[in-house]
Amino acid sequence: MRKNLLYAASAAMIMLFSASAFAQVPQTPPSRIGGTQQPDGQEAPRMSPQMTEFYEPVPPTVTPGAFDAKNQNWGAPSDAIILFDGSNLDEWVSARDGSPAEWDVADGLLTVNKRKGDIITKREFGDFQIHLEWRVPEGITGSGQSRGNTGLKIGGNTGYEIQILDGYNNPTYVNGMVGSVYKQTIPLVNPSRPNGEWQYYDIIFTAPTFNKLGQYRTKPKVTLIYNGVVVLNDVEIIGTTSYIGIPPVNQNTTYKLLLQAHGDPSEPVSFRNIWIREL
């Protein structure tokens, strides 16, 4: 009972003090709402919509790609670098020795040639957006990692691998399935189409930054849209891809892009419409 009386008395004193203090604070007349009082007694200009509107810098205009009715896909935007348009491998070399890339180009498609090994871009990229379309042959044999296995490796064999694999009714370990950062990140969902149909990736990659000790200041990040569905959402990559063990740190901040000629026995994967935008 005594405790309750003390609480009530304390509350009453706080209310009296607050009311007294509030009474001493000059109140802004209704006509001055929106302005602020300056030391010289003059009212500052009121806020207007124009005070939070910016007109520079003006973003450059980019023309989006045209729709290809025959292939039922969209072409590259006007500021993209074309990595494969169906005609040649001028942007690629052999990852083995830098000689001309020798995968098979026919009928507008680029098909993995496992005897010739991986291919890698001539150019390096930092932050980027890349689009690529790929197809696992209809009726492909094998299972798990031995069915349509290839990958996009950001930074070559010492970089970060985005797995490409037949994901339609093909169980495997989930951090190695289609749409994963291989051996690291599990996709949110699996929107794979049946083999024999075209699949596509849109990947946004943010390169890491490092301190003077070679430690991550910010880790690499990736967003992956697979067949129009987000499967990796601004995911941090732990380190470069390792088949065995913990992912190590590679201090590179620009990267060549490698397409993998995986040694599994299944029929080879084909690609088309590969382009990249530097961000």
Image (cartoon, rainbow, N blue to C red):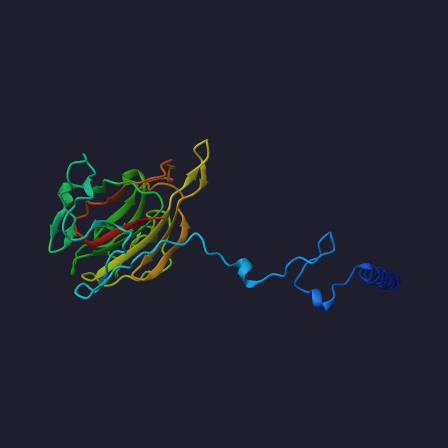
- x and y percent of residue 105 in the render? 12, 50
Task: Please give left or right for residue 190 compared with residue 73 in the image.
Answer: right
> Could you say where residue 249 lies in the image, as x and y percent from the top left?
39, 37
Q: Quadrant of residue 242?
A: top left
- Rendered-image quadrant of the N terminus: bottom right
Count numbered badges in the picture.
0
Q: Residue furthest bottom?
A: 30
| Residue drawn at the location 67% of the way across and 61% of the way down | 35
Name the foreground residue: 138 vs 40: 40
Q: Residue 29 location, x and y as percent?
A: 74, 66
**In the image: residue 53, left or right of residue 180:** right
Report if residue 104 is visible in the image. yes
Question: Residue reaching furthest top?
Answer: 213
Task: Give the image location of residue 34, x and y in percent.
Answer: 65, 63
Q: Nearer the viewer, residue 42 or 35?
A: 42
User: Which residue is depicted at the point 35% across and 41% down?
Assistant: 240
Give the residue drawn at x 28%, y 44%: 153
Residue placed most toward the observer, 93 or 173: 93
| Residue lying at the far left of the rendered structure | 106
Q: Can residue 171 be seen from the camera position used here? A: no
- Taking the image as shown, residue 237 lies to the left or right of residue 260, namely right
Quadrant in the rendering for residue 66:
bottom left
Q: Quarter-wise, where is residue 9 in the image?
A: bottom right
